[in-house]
Image: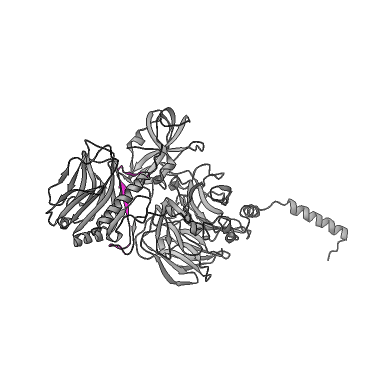
Amino acid sequence: MLFCSRGRTNVLSLLFLILLVYTPFSEAEELSVQIKQFTGSQTRLVWVQDQAEGDDTLAQKNNMKIMAYDSEDGKGVRAMSDRIDNYYKPLFTPDGETILVSVRNKHTIYTINFDSGRMKKFASGVAVAVWQDPASGKNWVYALDGDGAEDHKLSHKSLVRYRLDKPGKKELVWNKTPLSWSNLDVSEDGQIIGGLFPWPFGSTLNTKTGELKRIGKGCWTSLSPGNDKILWIFDGTHRNLGFTDTLSGESWKTNINGAPGIDGYEVYHPRWSNHFNFFSLTGPYKEGEGGNKIGGGGKDVEIYLGRFDNSLKNVVDWFQLTKNKKADFYPDLWIRDGKTSYQNYKKADPAEENTAALPDLNWPSGLKKVLFFWQNLFESNQLGEDSLVGFSQNAVEPSGNSIFNRFGEMELRKGSFAAEYKENEALKIIRTENYFGMEMLYSPFQYGAVSGTIFSYGEKADGRIAMRQVNNGLELLIPEHVPVKLDTVFSKEKASYHFFLAIDNSVLQLYIDGKLIHKVDGLGASLEKIKSGHLAFGSSNLVGEGLSGAISHVVLFGKKPADKERAADVEIIRKQVAERQIVDRIELLGELTEKSVIPLPDSLGAYSRALTVNRYRVIDVVAGKYESDQILVASWAVLDREPVESAVSAEEGSQIRLSVEPFDSHPELEGERLMMDMFEPDLDLYYSVEK
């Protein structure tokens, strides 16, 4: 036994303290101190790491390992186990103790105890969210499960939920629309689900009323923790979040690729944590071919954490968690004090909700007589359960050179749009009722020597109803009937025309701007000749014809609307058109000085269209005002998976006449894929407007 004098003991204690002070922290200890300084509390993360080439950005292959980090356990960044599989999107339970992870290609969900790493089979499906019932304290796992096709962008399987403590209990949540894989969130009170219903439409689902409300376009939605019901939608540049406070209607954009180490490149997998001010993402993405950096992934892709200010309009601090040569994807961030963060945001007073942000419920009149309606790109355009065809989420899909314009209208540009709706059910009702009614607003951009289809119902080979512009007049095509021709309809002095075409039994009536212009009796059984419910706008693959014009406010009726309903529609549409705001356009001559890489169509993944940003030296401002000697302009480079010839042929050094408008004044571009190889924070972005 050794004995020490008091003096010697003091010396040894002092030496121990000196060694303690000057002994460097381990890497794990240093990381723990740094991350707790960043978040202010115990912090956990879980994600998947690509063990192969680092290009499996959407976790489609079998090369993923589940990774984890806890600021309190001293282990640093670690693998939950050595197992490698098709692991997808791990999720924390609200207490941070359990992880839900899916093997997507086997449609199987597992639970993992965070501390022990013990893995246990939970249920069938793919887990997309975990929610705690505030009343009972029970946890529910939301998943995509059941029958239905799926691909990398959407799933036709049902949204269901399981009790975490009773996985044998499964409840149906939603099966009326396809859904997308990432992200789906449930508000704390369980009343709102935020997600893509489906991609690219960020929406909220009211679980009490069943109302599905479209908020905007993009990808990677996330709903704020708590009950503020703020939805973000990731934009097409993969650099910004578009926020919408769904209670007040306020919206704004926040940049999220400004972290040191991201260097202006694209980011991906953004997800809100359980804390109001913190989120996670992955990046930088800089290895993709043909301008599509996301598809390339890369072994430099790391996990980053960001901190919003209380307004959510700025990211005020960044933290890089991982530094390795493995691609890290799908992070989920959990912070122990997350629930205390919700009061920092100024909550909207439900009594002061912005009703102007809600869709106009007065149009179209006579909804119970409607088979299909499409107001514009920004509205939900859906029919309820009590409609003639039941619940129906209607859309139009562009093809060829067609685009949507800043009012959300279909802009033809000699291309076409196809309606997506319950066409078989609609055709049966039209033939049973022996009634066809078509309403729309059409704005021609061309006059004189022009011909093309405005709309068609049915297939050409089997008989169809069609309305065509021929020079300044109209031509109506009815199965087994002589075409109806009206020579003078369109005038340069008039911007738009409201049409209502009806076939009621054997009588055709055409109304223009609410007035009966033409009537034909004795059509016979024309509607019986139509074999298809295909509804299209514009000319599709017809050589030598095609229109440049815009279409909106489309309604297909299966039952005759009352005269007062039809008249009300005309007045509502005219009022909406009159309230449209004009944007100042700039006409300029520019020299192309730098091009962004045009993506290969096959590299776009879920996207079929893409814009690229080019830099121009301003030679002359012909009309409007522009002060800088340089300008950044976004223009279409890929449409309908085909490269745009003007984008391909443009060469650096060439002089180009441009008509541009501020990019931010074109909400229809929100969520579109946008390739920008240059980083110029001091230059505003403009959009090339073509007619």
The quarter holding residue 114 reads: bottom right
As drawn, is 393 to the left or to the right of 506? right
User: Is 229 rendered above or below residue 581?
Assistant: below
Farthest residue, direction front: 564
As drawn, is 482 to the left or to the right of 225? left
- The stretch drawn in magenta includes residue 404: yes
Q: Position of residue 206 (x, y in %)?
A: 43, 62
Closer-to-camera residue (346/220)? 346
- The stretch drawn in magenta includes residue 265: no
Closer-to-camera residue (190/511)? 511
Q: Does the rendering let one see residue 229?
A: no
Number of numbered tags placed on the structure image? 0
Name the residue at 29% across, 59% down: 366
Q: Quadrant of the N terminus?
A: bottom right
As drawn, is 295 to the left or to the right of 469? right
Q: Position of residue 630 (x, y in %)?
A: 46, 31
Q: Does the rendering let one see residue 381?
A: yes
The quarter holding residue 664 reads: top left
Closer-to-camera residue (121/248)? 248
Q: Quadrant of the C terminus?
A: top left
Farthest residue, direction top: 619
Q: Position of residue 180 (x, y in %)?
A: 40, 57
User: Is 138 rendered above or below residue 255?
Assistant: below
User: Is 653 rendered above or below residue 414?
Assistant: above
| Residues in magenta, as a range | 386-407
Q: Position of residue 232 (x, y in %)?
A: 47, 52
